[in-house]
Image (tube, helix red, strand yellow):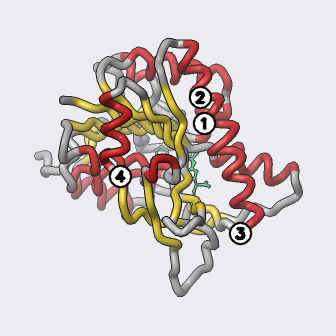
């Protein structure tokens, strides 16, 4: 059996028309599916309104106690529930979850010498059974970027990582395709040129693109997660626009575990 794991990024979510189209395409996807959403931009906006400073290190949000409250309100509340209500309107029966719900994703607080990330979690266990139970009941899980440590503490976890770890966990049971949807048509050779999509990337071209500085910023953790997924039995991994969900021939980037010649 096949499962699609689809991640939609913060820039798409912030734009009402883009979100609507993304959810249209997602709702129309055939078969079993899981949606993972970010929302980093909206969290930054709310923090600004509340006069709370946002600090990012290596693309990760430094999450102090106040920031944890903000991300819980934004990811676990506003974004997740908005998405579910829109999916219900499209006849997709969905439920929004944090990692604490159904104990679906546990993590451990990140402790690194160099930086204090605060309440940021690295995933330790995806509870595959929680997802299988929902999928078998024809319920579509909608997952946000929040995990828990099993001792009562919520932790902030990058949404790209949540998507790849769910995809990996389900790969023991299903043939999984992982789609990273964002506001561009794929990995671009030049970020300012929408038509410069690199259609195929394997390990060696990935390393070259990093060395050349073409893969940078948010693309670094995204592509790291892509290869991590492929190395752990995820069947297909794509990076592209929401159009790739509706049209299999849409221009996008396909990631490859084996070297292309
Ligand atoms: N080679 C590249 N191709 C496409 N985008 C790139 C590239 N290098 C850097 N980027 C930047 O990465 C951003 C996407 O990363 P991020 O914001 O983390 O994604 P998401 O919206 O999925 O969370 C793009 O908006 C773009 O500005
Ligand atoms: C630890 C960490 O950085 N978590 C991310 C989770 C949200 C996310 O990944 O959202 P996008 O996909 O929209 O970027 C954050 O708070 O920004």
Can you identify the residue that label 4 sits on? 127
Can you identify the residue that label 3 sits on? 64
Q: Where is residue 71 in the image (x, y as percent from the top left)?
A: 68, 52
Local packing at callout 4 (Cα closer than 10 Å; few below 14, some 14-19, many 20+) is some
Q: Position of residue 5 (x, y in %)?
A: 36, 36
- Residue 193 seen: no
Q: In this view, does 104 lie above or below 139?
A: below
Q: Residue at x 41, y 27 (%)?
A: 139
* Total numbered badges shown on the rendered structure: 4
Quadrant (top left, top right, bottom left, bottom right) of the N terminus: top left
Q: How far apart are marks 4 and 1 (CA)?
A: 20 Å
Report which quarter residue 29 is drawn in: top left
Q: How far apart are marks 4 and 2 (CA)?
A: 23 Å
For marks 2 and 3 on the same chain, the one whose residue lies earlier in the sequence: 3
Q: Which residue is drawn at 50% across and 16% down?
A: 24
Q: Which residue is drawn at 56% across and 44% down?
A: 38
Can you identify the residue that label 2 sits on? 83
């Amino acid at each position: 059996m096949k499962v699609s794991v689809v991640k939609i990024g913060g820039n798409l979510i912030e734009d009402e028309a883009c979100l609507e189209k993304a959810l249209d395409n997602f709702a129309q996807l055939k078969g079993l599916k899981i949606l993972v959403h970010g929302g980093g931009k909206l969290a930054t906006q709310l923090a600004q309104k509340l006069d709370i400073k946002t600090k990012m290190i290596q693309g990760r949000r430094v999450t102090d106690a106040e920031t944890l409250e903000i991300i819980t309100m934004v990811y676990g509340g506003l974004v997740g529930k908005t998405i579910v209500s829109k999916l219900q309107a499209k006849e997709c029966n969905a439920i929004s979850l944090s990692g604490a719900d159904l104990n679906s994703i546990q993590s451990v607080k990140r402790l690194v010498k160099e930086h204090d990330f605060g309440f940021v979690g690295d995933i330790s266990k995806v509870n595959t059974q929680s997802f299988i139970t929902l999928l078998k009941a024809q319920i579509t899980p909608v997952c946000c970027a929040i995990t828990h440590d099993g001792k009562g503490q919520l932790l902030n976890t990058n949404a790209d990582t949540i998507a790849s770890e769910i995809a990996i966990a389900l790969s023991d049971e299903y043939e999984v395709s992982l789609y990273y949807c964002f506001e561009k048509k794929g990995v671009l050779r030049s970020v300012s040129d929408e038509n410069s999509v690199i259609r195929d990337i394997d390990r060696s071209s990935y390393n070259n693109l990093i060395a050349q500085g073409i893969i940078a910023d948010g693309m670094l953790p995204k592509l790291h997660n892509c290869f991590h997924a492929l190395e752990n039995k995820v069947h297909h991994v794509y990076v592209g626009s929401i159009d790739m969900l509706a049209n299999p021939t849409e221009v996008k980037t396909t990631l490859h575990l084996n070297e292309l010649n």
